[in-house]
Amino acid sequence: MKITVIGTGYVGLVSGVCYAHLGNEVICVDKDVQKIATLKAGVIPIYEPGLKELADACMESGHLQYTTDLGEAIQEAEVVIIAVGTPPLPGGGADLQFVEAVAREIGANLNGYKVIVVKSTVPVGTNETVEEIIARHTIHAFDIASVPEFLREGTAVSDTLNPDRIVIGTKSDKAADRLSELHKPLTNQIVITDIRSAEMIKYASNAFLATKISFINEIANLCEKVGADVTEVAGGMGLDKRIGGSFLKAGIGYGGSCFPKDTKALIQIAGNVEYDFKLLKSVVEVNNHQRFGVIDKLYRALGSLQGKRIAIWGLAFKPDTDDVRESPAIEIVERLLELGAVPAVTDPIAMSNFRKLINHPSIQWSATALEAAQGADAVCLLTEWQDYIQVDLRKLEQVMARPILIDGRNAYSTKQLETGRFAYYPVGRPALNNEDIAIHEMI
Ligand SMILES: NC(=O)C1=CN([C@@H]2O[C@H](COP(=O)(O)OP(=O)(O)OC[C@H]3O[C@@H](n4cnc5c(N)ncnc54)[C@H](O)[C@@H]3O)[C@@H](O)[C@H]2O)C=CC1
Ligand SMILES: O=C(O)[C@H]1O[C@H](OP(=O)(O)OP(=O)(O)OC[C@H]2O[C@@H](n3ccc(=O)[nH]c3=O)[C@H](O)[C@@H]2O)[C@H](O)[C@@H](O)[C@@H]1O
């Protein structure tokens, strides 16, 4: 099938490459001239395991092309996929300017029947708006379909090639048939539904996963107070098939370009029809607060943070990505700076994306975990990179000024730490060797 994918962010690029890998003829378009030049040179501008190898092979076989010429790319295609960004507006709603601009371009360049797919995450009703915009600009027939994307960063290629399900929201049998044909090699689990339900499935899925995370984080906070271990609790809960074990890892809360954006957008979608989505509002509130558990623990361990060197391990919102969008680590570092601490920050690949604070005079940027920990009063693990999990804890203890380890991701087992002198503060699990200063001071 001849496919044009518009937008070469995570979704556009990964899905374009994967459709090409399946033997389709794919053109990936972006208005960003630099990005297209980079891609044409064989460089993948995002960090995504396995993507480069696949893209190289598809380029070589002639199944994948990159261009900035949107008009020509649209005219070549049988299926046109919109995968541009839908970033949050200041009020929380989704900014649809890129989707709408692309719809105008599609309308202006249509040269015969095509299926137009919206893969970007868009509020309910947007596909209908896209259809209206295209129709206003063309005399040609076309069908519209909502095919939301469920990939995760870091595992985007395998998620795309092995999806749990493909959702196709359309009122056209012809479009449903063509898109089922396209996705058949990936899964038998193809859900064909109406457009609005498809749009809603995407938001509801992200909101539900975010709810699981905030729920387990609340349980973790409670576990700390009653002396239970949240990893045991989550393990015991997850064995119940009705609950499932995934997305029950307690930590510093969810970040990334989607959960924070999509939960707020769904609250706004509800608000627009005068529905007060109380549960989701609490999910967001819990998440916004959860990151500060790290600061509370630093206070308990050290008292005042003024002048204290605090090693920060990890900036990416999760491992295996260089994405720091809405990463809880950003706010943790900002709060440390406000409190007069000296953050010594490291991340294997995300540091250069930490643009907001890259030139801050009080941050010490470190190449490795042990360099950041050198002379530190505490280490805070914020992203569970393998390098950090496998660090030599004896060496770590030797280089630190005080052996205080705040584990924001429950990356270490109590057993690993039993032999050392670490004061260890995990999330929702019993602390080790903690002589809490604040508590002593209060007494
Ligand atoms: N990042 C992720 O893991 C996932 C994202 N999504 C959704 O997919 C959509 C895209 O997300 P990302 O790939 O992260 O976006 P992104 O913001 O990283 O990339 C969007 C790309 O579209 C390009 N673009 C914008 N207007 C254009 C135009 N008129 N013509 C050609 N190119 C244009 C931009 O230059 C940019 O390269 C969003 O709605 C997002 O919510 C869904 C699932 C996963
Ligand atoms: O719409 C999207 O963009 C995507 O959003 C998420 O994918 P992603 O943001 O890449 O990453 P996740 O693995 O879902 O993690 C999101 C955040 O939740 C946190 N998390 C995840 C799982 C968990 O148990 N606990 C937890 O704190 C992670 O650390 C991370 O900060 C969804 O998992 C994808 O299905 C969806 O397509």
Image (cartoon, rainbow, N blue to C red):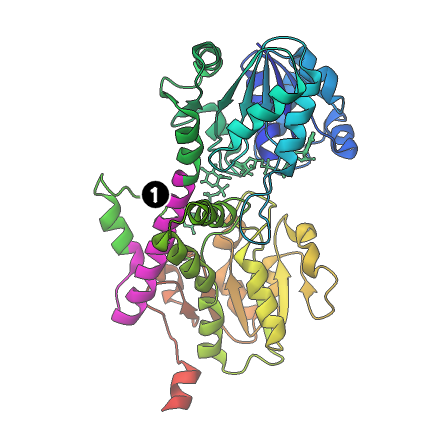
Residue sitting at 60 percent across and 29 percent down?
12
Residue sitting at 56 percent across and 23 percent down?
131
**Range shown magenta:** 204-231
The residue to which callout 1 is attached is 246
Q: Say which quadrant the C terminus sits in.
A: bottom left
Classify residue 383 as left or right of residue 99.
left
Above/below status of 140 relative to 289: above
Residue sitting at 53 percent across and 65 percent down?
396
Residue 174 is situated, as x and y percent measured from the top left of the image, at 46, 9
Q: Quadrant of ligand 1?
A: top right
Question: Which sits in the foreground, 143 or 73?
Answer: 143
Classify mark 1: helix, strand or loop: loop
Residue 280 is situated, as x and y percent measured from the top left of the image, at 38, 52
Residue 253 is situated, as x and y percent measured from the top left of the image, at 45, 56
Amino acid type of the residue that numbered disc 1 sits on in the rendered structure: Ser
11 within the magenta span: no
Ligand 2 lies under 8 Å from the Cβ of mark 1: yes
Task: Judge whether residue 250 can be spotted in this image.
Answer: no
227 within the magenta span: yes
Classify residue 395 as left or right of residue 244.
right
